[in-house]
Image (cartoon, rainbow, N blue to C red):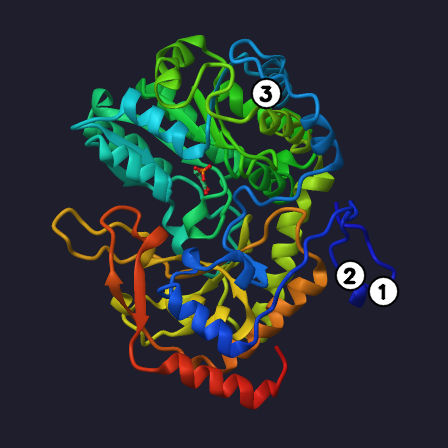
Amino acid sequence: MAVKFYKSENQVPLEMHKVRMVQKLNLLPVDERLKKMQEAGNNTFLLQNRDVFLDMLTDSGVNAMSDLQFAAMMRADDAYAGCETFNRVKDAIKEVFGCDNVLPAHQGRACENILAEAFCGQGKVALMNFHFTTAKAHFTRVGSTVEELIDPAGLIPKSNNPFKGNFNLENLAERIDQIGRDNVAFVRVESGTNLIGGQPVSLENMLAVTDICHDKGVISVLDASLLQDNIYFMKTREARCKYMDVKEIYHLLADHFDIIYFSARKLSFSKGGIICSKDPKYTRQLQVYIPLYEGFLTYGGIDVRTMEAMAQGLYESLDMDYISQGPMFIETLARELDEYGVPVILPAGGLGCHLNAGAFVPDMPHNQYPAAAVGTALYIISGIRGMERGTVSEQREPDGTERYAELELQRLACPRRVFTLSQIKYVADRVKWLWDNRQYIGGLQWTEEPEVLRFFFGRMKEIGNWQERLVEKFKEDFGDSL
Ligand SMILES: Cc1ncc(COP(=O)(O)O)c(C=O)c1O
């Protein structure tokens, strides 16, 4: 938790860990950054990491591991079947969630694929607070539709609402009745709702969702990938949770949800994916798909050393000193930007600071992709790589028309335990400059547009030559500074 400083003006989040291994960073000159961005088709996913200074693309699989995680990796047991390593993962899941039934998968989207195979299909509807890209792609791939029942307050970019990821409870009960319980694949709650700014769901709301599901006889699923940030927000924003132990919250959720899955690239500072449940009937139903798509039931496509890191990382996800670091850094960055007038999503969520690109370039139409445009501009002027979380991240409608995102966001992820505060200050400084020079930012258009998950590998070009003019202005203001 935050340590109180003697001089309140010096107050910053204080890391409760130290850095014992470093990786050299490279900051290219601005002309080269322009060239690299254009070569990458204006898609930050297509940049090489050697050309990136601060990699804020994602918090997935890039969190810093602890000394204890590295130590644990040394004792991995790589038996194909029945390895001790998997037993240690099971022990950790039992400790954190209280669940005995555990299935491994190679990452979060693999869990989603398995849920899709087991429960989705033509005529089935997956209800959720908000979709995540890979979840929606898997559920719709097998013929299901996805419906989002987010509380409308969640889509207001700047507010005091502490739980903007909450389900609209009234609509949930009503929609289940309208659809008919047999046509509901499941109700999925995404903790730390990714695409709307890493916004948390309150404990009260999650439990109310599961009550409705039990009442109506439909399966409740918790996507716990971002649960550790969500639990930090429950502890700090929800009166009921203030004095609850972190573990008590995890256990309470596992008592109520039928199925929990998560990407260990986020939860547990490692890699891999897990599906777990208190009720063996669900894991029995799902386990047939594990050897088919992932690997044997005791490794599920995950390297055994990584599973050891996951087991240790799960224990660390109970530690408030560790789980508070990310959200506190994000809050610091978001607050500084907001005070300067830069439009950011507030309150700050987990996983990253989200620039409200729609408000950055309010006159730019959705079909010139404002969130992507702001991201390319930011890389060019700073070497910081963010991720588009707006219209480019949406899928087109089946008839080919664009589906415009509810929010046009440029996400600056803060991988957990990775950046120093001076690096966060650099981010704030360059974003402020970009805000003051936002009139230089222009739009983008497709040159190559893949049909599925286009944001990963689609290519675009600038409309006009605004990027060159942005570089000239940068040089005018910063001289020969990198
Ligand atoms: C909420 C959420 N669910 C699922 C996933 C998919 O996990 P993975 O990247 O491990 O496939 C992610 C990844 O970003 C996520 O944020």
Residue 387 in which image quadrant = bottom left
Front position in the image: 250 or 353 = 353
Q: CA distance from mark 2 to mark 3?
A: 36 Å
Q: Would you say the residues marked 1 and 2 are in contact, meaning their CB atoms lie under 8 Å apart?
A: yes
> What's the residue type where badge 2 is placed?
Gln
Which numbered disc flags the more N-terminal residue, 2 or 3? 2
Beta carbon at label 1 within 8 Å of ligand 1: no
Which numbered disc flags the more N-terminal residue, 3 or 1? 1
Q: Is residue 131 visible?
A: no
Pointer 2 local density, CA inside 10 Å: few below 14, some 14–19, many at least 20: few
Residue 414 at x, y = what percent?
A: 59, 53
User: At 70% across and 26% down in the image, what residue appears?
Assistant: 74
Residue 312 at x, y = what percent?
A: 67, 27
User: At 25% across and 52% down in the image, what residue appears?
Assistant: 450
Residue 171 at x, y = what percent?
A: 30, 37
User: At 35% across and 77% down in the image, what residue appears?
Assistant: 442
Q: Which residue is mark 1?
A: 7
**96 sits left or right of 125 in the view:** right
Q: CA distance from mark 1 to mark 2?
A: 7 Å
Front position in the image: 38 or 273 = 38
> Which element carries disc 2, helix, strand or loop?
loop
Q: Which residue is mark 3?
A: 93
Q: If the image is split into quadrants, where does the N terminus sit? A: top right
> Which element carries disc 3, helix, strand or loop?
helix
Q: Which residue is mark 2?
A: 11
Q: Is residue 133 visible?
A: yes
- Which image quadrant shows ligand 1? top left
Quick one: which residue is furthest to the bottom in this view?
476
